Image (tube, grey):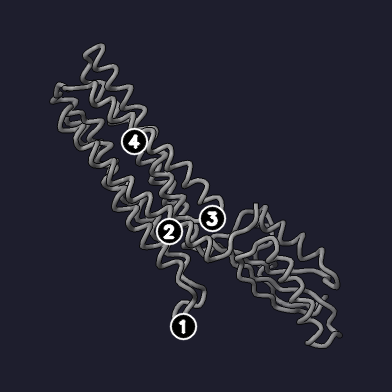
């Protein structure tokens, strides 16, 4: 599948964000009707999660618009990390939803409430389930093409919703057939715990980007292979990588023949950069040229034995 241009990537991300907000509004409306008709804590937990999703999806849209802005005098690396910041905010809202549902669930264990109109509730949750699955499929496609942290985080929200919708449908069926009202509360508490775990994972991923965590060892090893496959290259050292929010940043020291003129070493460096950008089209690359065999203090020496690559 051909790589997207920056403009195509930004357009695709914005479309996914708008679709997410529109669907969330629809889900909030029909789930609220379900809560009013059934009194189900499980449907209420899903409605609250959708409300947090609406806020989070709105933040995602704003973050994508901001991250799509080109580099300027104040942000010369661009604005891509706005997506990771939005994912961190989403994690906080998921965690808040989980805590609220957990608290209400424990309260209802001691003060149970009967459920009504479970058949209508089942129908509403099935509609929610189908719409959510369709959105997730589109979001995963967009995230795979654009490497967007914000869209991935938004997709994670709705993946949780699929799990919760399935469990709520099961709950309403059990209550409808066996009249076990406390089962609704138990499922709501389980959902809240799952929300908290998911929030923690999202926060970890967002913090990794914000803290400039190195890209995975496979990407680093591939960079090394590409660089060393280029003509006239003796070696490389002090390779640093990071995710700028949908675009990669590479910095490395390139070891070349020290007797060559600057114009020639510059030409060799340009060829290395060209090959790297074939593999990673939107990457920002900085190459420092060093004479091969130069003895100097290096980051690689300071980190020796601490890193995989």
Left or right, 157 with respect to 265, comes to left
Q: In the rendered image, which residue does mark 1 sit on?
A: 73
Where residue 285 sits in the image (x, y, percent)? 64, 71
Residue 147, labelled with which disc? 3
Alpha carbon separation for disc pair 2 and 4: 31 Å
- In the image, residue 63 sits, relative to residue 105, either above or below, namely below
Which one is in front in this view, the residue at disc 3 or the one at disc 4?
3
Residue 185 seen in render: no
Q: Secondary structure at mark 4?
A: helix
At 42% from the left edge and 62% from the top edge, which residue is drawn? 64
Which one is in front in this view, the residue at disc 4 or the one at disc 1?
1
**Tag 1 near tag 3, CB within 8 Å:** no
Which of the two residues, 192 or 124, is positioned nearer the viewer here? 124
Q: Mark 1: few, some, or many residues within 10 Å (few <14, many ≥20)? A: few
**Tag 1 near tag 2, CB within 8 Å:** no
Residue 91, labelled with which disc? none
N-terminal of the pair, mark 3 or mark 4, is 3
Left or right, 85 with respect to 231, comes to left
Q: In the rendered image, which residue does mark 4 sit on?
A: 193
- In the image, residue 203 sits, relative to residue 39, either above or below, namely below
Q: In the rendered image, which residue does mark 2 sit on?
A: 14
Which one is in front in this view, the residue at disc 1 or the one at disc 2?
2
Q: Secondary structure at mark 3?
A: loop
N-terminal of the pair, mark 3 or mark 2, is 2
Left or right, 263 with respect to 7, comes to right
Alpha carbon separation for disc pair 3 and 2: 13 Å
């Amino acid at each position: 599948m051909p790589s997207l241009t920056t403009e195509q990537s930004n357009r695709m991300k914005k479309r996914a964000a708008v679709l997410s907000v529109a669907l969330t509004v629809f889900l909030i409306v029909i789930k609220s009707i379900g809560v009013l008709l059934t009194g189900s804590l499980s449907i209420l937990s899903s409605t609250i999660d959708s409300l947090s999703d609406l806020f989070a999806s709105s933040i995602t849209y704003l973050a994508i618009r901001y991250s799509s802005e080109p580099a300027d005098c104040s942000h010369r690396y661009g604005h891509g990390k706005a997506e990771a910041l939005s994912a961190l905010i989403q994690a906080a809202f998921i965690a808040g939803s989980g805590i609220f549902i957990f608290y209400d669930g424990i309260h209802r264990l001691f003060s149970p409430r009967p459920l009504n109109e479970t058949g209508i509730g089942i129908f509403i949750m099935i509609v929610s389930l189908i719409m959510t699955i369709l959105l997730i499929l589109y979001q995963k496609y967009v995230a795979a093409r654009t490497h967007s942290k914000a869209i991935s985080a938004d997709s994670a929200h709705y993946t949780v919703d699929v799990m919760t919708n399935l469990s709520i449908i099961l709950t309403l069926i059990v209550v409808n057939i066996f009249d076990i009202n406390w089962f609704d509360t138990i499922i709501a508490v389980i959902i809240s715990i799952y929300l908290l775990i998911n929030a923690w994972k999202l926060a970890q991923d967002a913090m990794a980007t914000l803290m400039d965590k190195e890209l995975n060892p496979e990407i680093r090893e591939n960079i090394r292979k590409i660089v060393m496959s280029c003509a006239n290259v003796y070696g490389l050292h002090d390779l640093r990588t990071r995710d700028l929010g949908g675009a990669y940043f590479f910095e490395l020291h390139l070891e070349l023949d020290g007797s060559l003129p600057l114009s020639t070493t510059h030409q060799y460096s340009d060829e290395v950069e060209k090959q790297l950008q074939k593999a990673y089209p939107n990457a920002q690359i900085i190459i420092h040229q060093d004479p091969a065999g130069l003895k100097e203090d290096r980051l690689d020496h300071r980190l020796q034995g601490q890193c995989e690559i």
